[in-house]
Amino acid sequence: NIVLIHSSKAVYALGTLTGKQLWRYAATYSIDGAPLVVGEQLYLNIDGGAITALQLGTGDVLWTYTSTQDAVFLIGANGERVYTATYTGAIFALNAVNGSQLWHYVAGIYFPTPPLLVDDVVYTVTLGNAVTALRGTDGARLWKQAMQGSVNAFSAMGENVYVNVQDTATSRSNLIALNNLTGAQRWQTNLMGSIAGKPVAVNGLLYLSDNLGTMYALRASDGLQEWSYTS
């Protein structure tokens, strides 16, 4: 029964039936991005390297985590853990109740694309253009798969992790599907241009576009092209 709105330095909670302000939280520094709501808690990414957790119903501050290394940003959260990262290549898992650090992982590179949280697994790019899966409970590495090219973006849907890999020699993109449990490659589709953004999955098809103005529909099962359209 709450509607949240936010400005650069404040978050407001309004009642859905009355529109009256229920609470307001004023941040000391700018709020980066939209608030993240999970259960009865709201998480804010505060400029300068802090994550603040608020009680959704009251706006009370539950805890604040401040990074000693670099500016942090939110990856995602569940009822037990909050996942954050630094742009310089470190990932942290925090206790959702009190904000204490549970584990951290050093990727060894500046992140070319933000890490991704799906079903309590963190997918990230690590040194050597590799896609790595980390177990959410303790940060243990589940698998690592090296890519032949530069990783631009990735997404996870169903049983696959989809990786956009750019061939540095030709500037063309390859869309690669990896098994989300083992990291083994399921299929690879080579495209004419550079992929723009992440694929969208609908009814067994993947929709994506490239920088040449072509949209593709690929089968999620094997990567074969159903159709393409060039504007």
Image: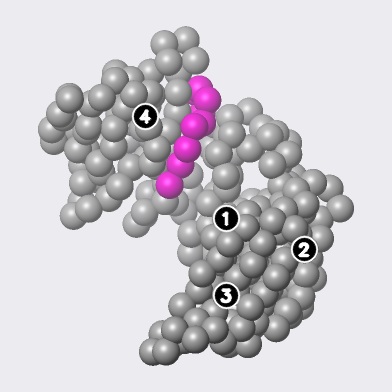
Vertical order, 177 against 92 (above or below):
above
Q: Which residue is mark 3?
A: 12
The CA distance from mark 1 to mark 2 is 15 Å
The CA distance from mark 4 to mark 1 is 24 Å
Q: Position of residue 143 (x, y in %)?
A: 57, 47
Q: Position of residue 33 (x, y in %)?
A: 57, 55
Q: Residue at x 63, y 78 (%)?
A: 24
Vertical order, 162 against 26 (above or below):
above
Residue 87 falls in image quadrant: top right
Residue 17, label in figure:
none
Q: Quadrant of the C terminus?
A: top left
The magenta span reads: 147-155
| Dot 4: element | strand
- Asked if the residue under mark 2 is in contact with the one under mark 3, i.e. CB atoms within 8 Å, the reply is no
Q: Which residue is mark 1?
A: 33
Front-lying residue, 184 or 227: 227
First-in-chain label (1 vs 3) = 3
The CA distance from mark 2 to mark 4 is 39 Å
CA neighbours of label 1 inside 10 A, class few (<14), some (14 to 19), many (20+): some
| Dot 2: element | loop
